[in-house]
Amino acid sequence: MTAVRRPARLRSTLLALPLAATALVGGLAAPAQAQAQAQPQAQAAAQRPLTCQGQGIDPTAQLHYQTQIFIKAPLSTVWRVHTDVAAWPRWQRAVSTMEPLTPGRLRPGSQFRWTTPAPATASTPATTLVVTSTVQDVRPGQCIRWMGPAIGDGLRIDRGTHVWNFIKVPGGVIVRTEESWTGAQIEADPATAIRYLAPGLDEWLADLKARAEAQACHH
């Protein structure tokens, strides 16, 4: 199923992580039968904001974005690929480096530091953002939520809050994600932020789909 954006009526402006100026990725259609079976559940879920353990994005944030995708792979495979943060640079085009700061599986308090390129805009130079993420909530196989700042030369996002939901459906998994950002710099120019940054979250899902489906084919 093609990634679906949340209707703009939820907020006047939308923003996505990671910060990468990439075109929307095509070719994400699920097989017709699985897509037809998953569609009603996806539509029902899209009416609700995302949460993990009852917590969602920053409710005061002016900038946020929600999207989802269908992945034809077992839930266990999708979850393993997504939460193995050390391997992100191997399959995520927008992740340049990754440094897990807490050993073991992701759990509340786990931290990881990663970098992602941010393109130049009319008001900011091209830079590499250093993102330090701290897991806030996790329910294995169902959801995870993390937050943290992103800092680069001439660009700063004070806090991003990122929620992921994993919904098992016939033929695979629907992965839904919602992200909010706060910070005076990006809130001062939201039109530029969304024009450059929104495709990054769709690309993340596209890369996750490709990786998980490839691994599922080899098992």
Image: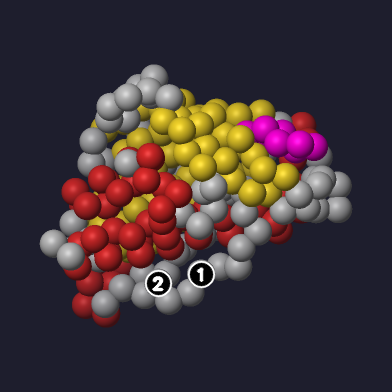
The residue stretch that appears in magenta: 150-157
Q: In the image, is 100 to the left or to the right of 25?
A: left
The x and y percentages for residue 118 are 68, 49
Residue 48 appears in the picture as rendered: no
Residue positioned 27% across, 79% down in the render: 32
Residue at the disc numbered 2: 28
Q: Position of residue 13 (x, y in %)?
A: 67, 49
Q: Determine whether 80 is above or below 185 in the image.
A: below
Residue at point 18% right, 57% down? 74
Of helix, strand and loop, which mostly describes the magenta segment? strand
Q: Give the percent coordinates (x, y) of residue 105.
A: 27, 30
- Going by the image, does 91 lie left or right of 12? left
Q: Decide: marks 2, 1 in contact (CB < 8 A)?
A: yes
Q: Is residue 187 magenta?
A: no
Q: How many marks?
A: 2
Q: Position of residue 185 (x, y in %)?
A: 78, 36
- For the N terminus, the image quarter is bottom left
Looking at the image, can residue 111 be seen?
yes
Residue assigned mark 1: 25
**Quarter of the figure with residue 158:** top right
SS label for mark 2: loop
Above or below, 96 relative to 33: above
At x 58% / y 59%, what residue is drawn? 199
Say if the magenta span includes residue 152. yes
Mark 1: which amino acid? Val
